[in-house]
Amino acid sequence: MRTKTTLASVAVFFAGLGLCFAADAQMGTWKLNEAKSKIPAGANKNHTVVYEAAGADTKVIVDGTDANGTAVHNEWTGKFDGKDYPVTGDPTSDTRAYRRVGARTLAMTIKKGGKVTVTGRITVTANGKSRTVMTTGTDAMGKKFKTTAVYDKSM
């Protein structure tokens, strides 16, 4: 009886451990699929986006190009709890907030000087092979924009 109880306890422990480390659909390296994306002329293009664990937080690393084709790089580290966390390397934003709205979907709010400049939704497909980032906002010149960027998971 004692052996069965011990084995059951060990099985429950490892099952729980597996749930704690279950893969988040957002995690990994994502490459922009320009053919499937609708990005207005003059907008930044995030060519590669990486989501990785950073202790209890998530780190998001973005590499791309601006309207002039100049390389851009920015980073964000925080939780998907809807709170603002600082962004480094992005002159168009100071903070980002991500909030989980489903197992495969995040809502995103980007701010500059405390003012919301971009809102969006990031959804990973059920098979985990691609994701769509839909954003709306206002650029530094006050012009409204809307983008749909499709990314393929890089293995």
Image (cartoon, grey):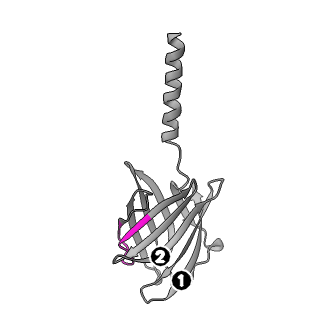
* Vertical arrangement, residue 107 with respect to residue 147, above or below: above
Is the residue under label 2 in contact with that under label 1 (CB below 8 Å)?
A: no
Residue 85 % position (x, y)? 36, 64
Is disc 2 surrounded by few (<14), some (14 to 19) or many (20+) residues within 10 Å? many
Q: Amino acid at mark 2?
A: Val
Residue 53 % position (x, y)? 42, 51
- In the image shown, does 136 or 34 lie closer to the viewer? 136
Secondary structure found at label 1: strand
Question: Magenta span has 101?
Answer: no
- In the image shown, does 110 or 59 lie closer to the viewer? 110
Q: Which residue does the image show at 48% across and 29% down from the upper left?
A: 13
Circle on res. 118: 2
Q: Which residue does the image show at 50% across and 80% down from the upper left?
A: 137
Residue 56 % position (x, y)? 38, 48
Residue 69 % position (x, y)? 47, 80
Image-quadrant location for residue 30 = bottom right
* Vertical arrangement, residue 123 with respect to residue 118, above or below: above
Number of residue marks: 2
Residue that badge 1 annotates:
145
The earlier-in-sequence mark between 1 and 2 is: 2
Q: Amino acid at mark 1?
A: Phe
| Residues drawn in magenta | 86-97
Residue 41 falls left or right of residue 71:
right
Circle on res. 127: none
Q: Which residue does the image show at 52% across and 50% down from the upper left?
A: 24
Q: Which residue does the image show at 53% across and 10% down from the upper left?
A: 1
Secondary structure found at label 2: strand
* Vertical arrangement, residue 22 with respect to residue 14, above or below: below
Q: CA distance from mark 1 to mark 2?
A: 9 Å
* Vertical arrangement, residue 138 with respect to residue 103, above or below: below
